[in-house]
Every structure is written in structure tokens, then in C-alpha cells.
Image (cartoon, rainbow, N blue to C red):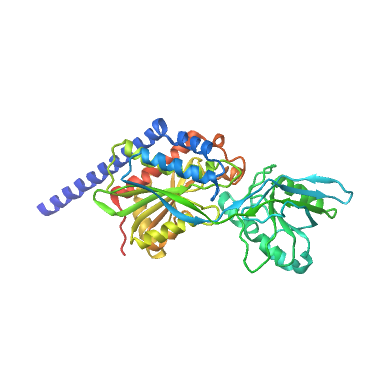
Amino acid sequence: MMKKILTSIFIAFHGLVLIAQSDDDALFIKQLHSYALKEGKAYQWLDTLCLKAPGRIAGSKSSSIAEQYMLEVLQSLKPDTVFLEPCETKSWMRGSIEIVETIDQHGNRHELHTCALGNSIGTEGEMISGECVEVLSLDQVDSLGNSLKDKIVFFNRPMDPSLVNTFHAYGSAVDQRVWGASRAAKYGAKAVIVRSMTNKIDTVPHTGTLVYIDSLPKIPAMAISTLDAEKLSEKLKNENITINLASSAQPGAASVNYNVIAEWRGKQFPEEIILFGGHIDAWDMGAGAHDDGAGCIHAVDAINILLAQNYLPKRTLRVVLFANEENGLAGGKTYAENSNKRNEKHLAAIESDTGGFVPRELSFDSETSLLIDYMRYVNQWLPLFETYDLNFKQAGSGADINPLKSQGSLLIGLRVDPQKYFDFHHTKNDQIYNVNQRELELGAATMASIIYLLDKYGLETKN
């Protein structure tokens, strides 16, 4: 009887300890949010980054300015280690000439809102012409085959507006931007124009990377605005349209950019690394405020917020601002290669690369054999985030941290509300004035919160 009473007392006491522990965590996470919203530096740092280094495409002077500025910001937070990690990147230059115009059967000309796609070759500034042929898929290009010789192929598959998650809509349409030029070149097309990747119908063209298949000819590739795409498609129903196209885009020489890295060594488990960051490069047309200045600043302000609470990490906390995500992933690949050479162990890696909007969820990914156990473990923390209208989801994390999956790390993506992201993505409108300060600060607080829990409790699996 006495044994049963003692057991009951132990269970009751143990339960009270867990409740108290959970209350302590909830209080600390509340402090992190309060500090972020009242005293955080996220918006200030992002504003300066966008002002000092807009259009920081790999290989550009602006990319080097951005790396130096973020290095100085991290140094101001007094890390144990801060350094630049070189990686070889390819460069590309847009040039000053970007023209796409239509000519109808009556000789009427209409210039479209356009921009060259990243990595596209140009026309050396000379105008080329061809009959416009509209397609909705890569497979349709194959079905038309050699009839596309000397034509200009118009890829016009829109993002699916019925998909609530706009990243899913983007993923279902972006293949035409990435692979369209090579697919059309296979059958002798002169050039391609591609509908911009956004649900918004406007006059703003969106750039973004394309990939040439080495075994096929390279042809120019230009994006046109969604409004122009809609109008051109309507015209093609009734008459033949000729496209005139000129571009001075050209590839540049190989160059060196740098991952910007800072770390705070753990006091108990320094060999276990918790990485968090974003990519510092951005396409050349805008300021890279949402993509991905916001992600970099989420990470930098997250450590700032934790340090402001006099927090002493158990594990090593490492900020990594990756180079060259947009145009080859050199930063993420180089980082993982060097980490593996050092035999490092990343307990977890967190990336923010979906913009500076209000945070909605944390997505989790890892090797299949580990993910179920990881999810079972982290789900105990979900009630601490529900207060902030955040959910947990088993899904992809981030392109830069994905190579760390081979280390058995838990990969985490900070996911924000996706509805407006593709209004600004890869455009001249990706500017600081399109970032809401409070929403940006909430993202930094969310990142700080998951870092805190990972550092305090670690991860447990059966393997």
C-alpha cells in the first residue's frame, strides 16, 4: 500500500515538474517574442542591407558589399567565431537591352513588359524575329517537334490559382521557365518567351533561373508579364503574331563569393551544431527584401534576441548566410562538403527562404529512417507555438540546408503566409517597403523559439 502511495506521489510530482517546465518554456518564448516586437533590429538591418546592396546576384559588386555588411553585423554580436567561407560561383550579366514586341498581321507593333531569364544568353543586342507559337507544357513542345524550327515559343501555363499553397502552384508551373529554352531549342526554335511565375495579373515581369542542357543549342529566353501573356494568348486565337526580341544578356566569368558564418560555442555539447540562416544573394532587378534578405535577417535577429536574454547555449549555435542559392546553390553545396570534411554533426538546420510575411508553420524533413522519430519528439513542443497561430508539418525545408540531410540532421523550414510572396518574387518590386516590420519581427521570434527548444532539449531518436 505504501509503495502505491509513493508511486502516486512520484507520478504527481513528476507531472508537476513537466508542467512547470512547460510553463517556463512558454514564458521564455513569450519573452523572445516581446523583445523581437519591441527591441529587435530585424527591420533596421534589412533596410540597410537593401539600401547598401540591392540586386546582389552572385559575382556582382553588390553581392560582395552584402557579404561584408552582414559580416560586420554578426561581428557586432560578439560571436566566438566569425568568418567568410569561399565558394566558386558563376556570374551572369543582364545587360541594358531587353525588348520583346509583337507585330500583328496589319503591322501594328506592341512592346511587352519583359526581362531576361537568369543565365539566358542574349542576341548580342541584335533583333531577332520569328512567328510566335503558344504552348502550355514541355510535352506539347515535343508533340509539335520540328514544326517549331525558326519559331519563337511562348510558354503560357499559368500558376494554378485554385491551389491555396502558392508554392505548390509555383512548383507546378516553373518547369517551363527552367527547362523551356532547351526543350524548344531541341527542335530548332530561335528563342522562348515565358509567362511570369505569379498569380497576379499585372505588368511586372519576373526573372528567375533557367538551366541549359549542355547537349542542346542555347537560345535566348525572356519572361513577359502575366497581363501581356493574357493579351498575347487572346490575339493568337485570331491571327498569326510575329515576335521581335533583343537582349544583351550574357554569362560572366567564374567568380568567388562567400558564405558568411558566425557561431556561439555550446557549453555542454559543443559538437552538436544547430545551424540557422538564409541565402544572401538575390536577383539583380530588386533589392532582395523578401528573397532572401528577410531569411538572413530572421537568423541574425534570432541570435540577437537570444543573446539579449543573456542566454547561454548548451549546443553550438551557428548562423550561416549562404551565397549563390539563386544561381547554382554553390554556397549550400560548399558548406556541406566542408562540414563533412570536418566530420561535423548538425543536430538541426533551419532555413528561412519564403519571405518576410507572418509566420505560419515550421516544416520538418530528414532521412526517412529518422523523420518519424524526430516528428514524434518535436510534436511535444507544438502547444508552445499554437499560441502564435503556428503549425508543424512534415515537408521540405530549404535548398541550402538540404545537403545536410546526409548527416542525419533534422532540417526545418520557417514557412510564412504564402499568398503575396509571388507578387514580389524575382521582380523589381522586391523592396523593403513591401515588407511589414511586425511580420518580419515575428519571423525572427519564431526562429529564436525553435532554436531555444532544440538547444535546451536536443533530439532523441530510437536509432
- Which residue: 48% across, 37% down? 439
Residue most extreme to the right: 106
Whole-percent x and y of residue 24?
28, 40
- Which residue: 70% across, 67% down? 186
- The answer to which quarter of the image holds residue 155 is bottom right
Residue most extreme to the left: 2
Residue most extreme to the top: 38
Can residue 240 be seen in this snapshot? yes
The residue lying toward the viewer, choosing from 274 and 118, is 118
Whole-percent x and y of residue 152?
76, 58
Q: Is residue 343 left or right of residue 364?
A: left
Q: Is residue 337 left or right of residue 62?
A: left
The residue lying toward the viewer, choosing from 40 and 53, is 53
Can residue 297 be seen in this snapshot? no
Q: Quadrant of the C terminus?
A: bottom left
Whole-percent x and y of residue 137?
68, 61
Q: Is residue 374 above or below residue 51?
A: below
Q: Is residue 342 left or right of residue 440?
A: left
Count how many numbered circles sit on residues in the image. 0
Whole-percent x and y of residue 429?
61, 40
